[in-house]
Amino acid sequence: MKMNVILILIIIGLLAGLFSGLFGVGGGVVMVPLMVFALGYTQHQSQGMSLAVLAVPVTFLAAYTYHKTGENPINFKYALIIAVCFVAGAYFGTKIAVSINENVLKKLFSLLLLFIAIKMFFSK
């Protein structure tokens, strides 16, 4: 593996972790576009890599840190319900994603990010 690729991977990991902890965004929002543009990965490769990185220990550490502050503890019953449904949704979403043309998927992903950004920017 070339040193510049290692450096790009380190930067992607640090930015994804920083933004995930700072803003509560999924690392995929940061990692997928960076892998597409900085590493030349396909949309499918980037999404798969993002999912591989977002393993349980990373998520657990971030959630535990928020819960530990005590100001707004996490409701683990609600989190469990969401998590179970998340697994089901991820299964079906992945099945759909791998069947969609690469360029169409990239455009859909971009539109989703744009929609969220505009909605957040203009909200109170």
Image (cartoon, rainbow, N blue to C red):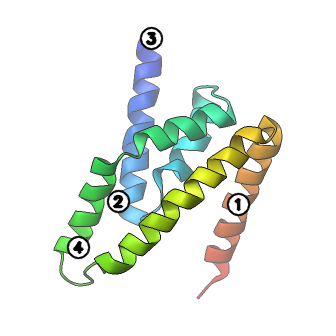
Q: At 59% from the left edge and 36% from the top edge, which residue is drawn?
A: 46
Q: Are marks 1 and 2 in contact (CB under 8 Å)?
A: no
Q: Of the two numbered discs 1 and 4 on the same chain, state the one appearing first in sequence.
A: 4
Whole-angstrom CA distance, mark 4 to mark 3, is: 39 Å
Q: Which mark is residue 91?
A: none
User: What is the three-letter code of the residue carrying label 2?
Assistant: Gly
Between 66 and 10, the one nearer to me in the picture: 66
In the rendering, at what x and y percent does residue 37 appear? 64, 33
Q: Of the two numbered discs 2 and 4 on the same chain, state the one appearing first in sequence.
A: 2
Q: Residues within 10 Å of mark 2 (few under 14, many from 20)?
A: some
Circle 4 residue: 67
Circle 1 residue: 112
Between 14 and 85, the one nearer to me in the picture: 85
Q: Residues within 10 Å of mark 4 (few under 14, many from 20)?
A: some
Between 40 and 101, the one nearer to me in the picture: 101
Whole-angstrom CA distance, mark 2 to mark 3, is: 29 Å
Between 91 and 75, the one nearer to me in the picture: 91
Circle 2 residue: 21
Point out the image quarter for the N terminus. Answer: top left
Q: Residues within 10 Å of mark 1 (few under 14, many from 20)?
A: few
